[in-house]
Image: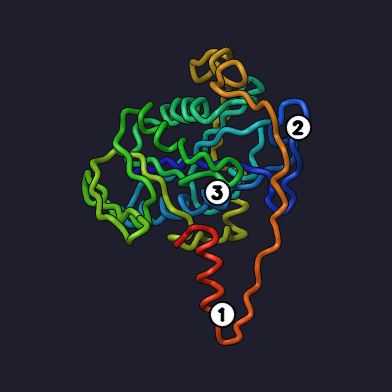
Amino acid sequence: MNVVVCVKQIPDPADPGALDPETKTLVRSGKLILDESDSYGVEMALQLVDAAGGGEVTLVSMAPNDEQSGLRTALAMGAAKAVLVSDEALRGSDALTTAKVLAAAIGRTGQPDLVLTATESSDGYTGTVPEQIAELLSLPSVTFAKSIAVDGGTASVQRQTEAGYDDVQVPLPAVVSVTAGVVEPRYPSFKGIMAAKSKPLDQVTVADLGMDAGQVGWSGAGQEIVDVSEAEAREAGTIVEDDGEGHQKVVEFLAELKVI
């Protein structure tokens, strides 16, 4: 079984950096790490390949400055190889452009049985890229997966909902987004870290994907960031001391808000 996992390399949340004052986008000039949200997809892919008794996990990523650190972490976990798209022309790409680039990169991996993604990235939170990739690849998709089991040409997915989960069956190949926390990502061993240094990493540009530079980045984006401002400071809350009538004070407070 061959599984492709889309992974994002992001600034370390412990030291997220700052916004570029001109472009108003996140500065990504330093070292990038594997998005924790994507580590769950990598782990689930590795488990599915093990359960199938054979195959491999391929990573696909888009990052600036030829950055490979996050990919090497996922390779150290056990993925077999990776495709990295890095090109200055990609600066300023929106979610749809990102999906187009990733879909084209997935096409370089052959015909995967399954494409896994996170539900959303930790630095973007659009939550739209997985569905866009599926549409561009003309593949069925399932979102918010908490478990995946493959039997022949069908994947059985438990799809997390607010009320519990849905049991969904989808023909393969398909695109499935994985909910964070559903598996315990393995820690790369020293042996895995050393092996990751020599695993194949195919680094490509926009031109290598058959795309024009005018279709990506700021030129191809369907959005423009016009302003960024700090969030309003949170106001102090109301403390209700229970003197025996605390419940009545809560009811009166809710009535003032017209909640009840």
Image quarter of residue 223: top right
Instruction: Please state which of the two labelled residues, at mark 1 or mark 3, is closer to the viewer.
Output: 1
Nearest the camera: 24 or 69? 24
Q: Are marks 2 and 1 in contact (CB under 8 Å)?
A: no
* Crowd tier of the residue under label 3, counting other residues whose Cα lies within 10 Å: few below 14, some 14–19, many 20 or above: many
Mark identifier at residue 181:
none
Q: Earlier in the sequence, mark 2 or mark 1?
A: 2
Q: Which residue is mark 1?
A: 246
* Crowd tier of the residue under label 1, counting other residues whose Cα lies within 10 Å: few below 14, some 14–19, many 20 or above: few
Residue at screen point 48% across, 55% down = 180
Residue at screen point 45% across, 25% down = 104
Position of residue 57 relative to residue 21, above or below, is below
Camera sees residue 50? no
Instruction: Please state which of the two labelled residues, at mark 2 or mark 3, is closer to the viewer.
Output: 2
On the rendered image, what quadrant is the C terminus found in?
Answer: bottom left
Q: Are marks 1 and 3 in contact (CB under 8 Å)?
A: no
User: Percent x, y for residue 114?
Assistant: 34, 41
On the rendered image, what quadrant is the N terminus found in?
Answer: top left
Say left or right for 137 vs 243: left
Mark identifier at residue 20:
2
Q: Which residue is mark 3?
A: 74
Kind of residue sitting beneath label 2: Asp
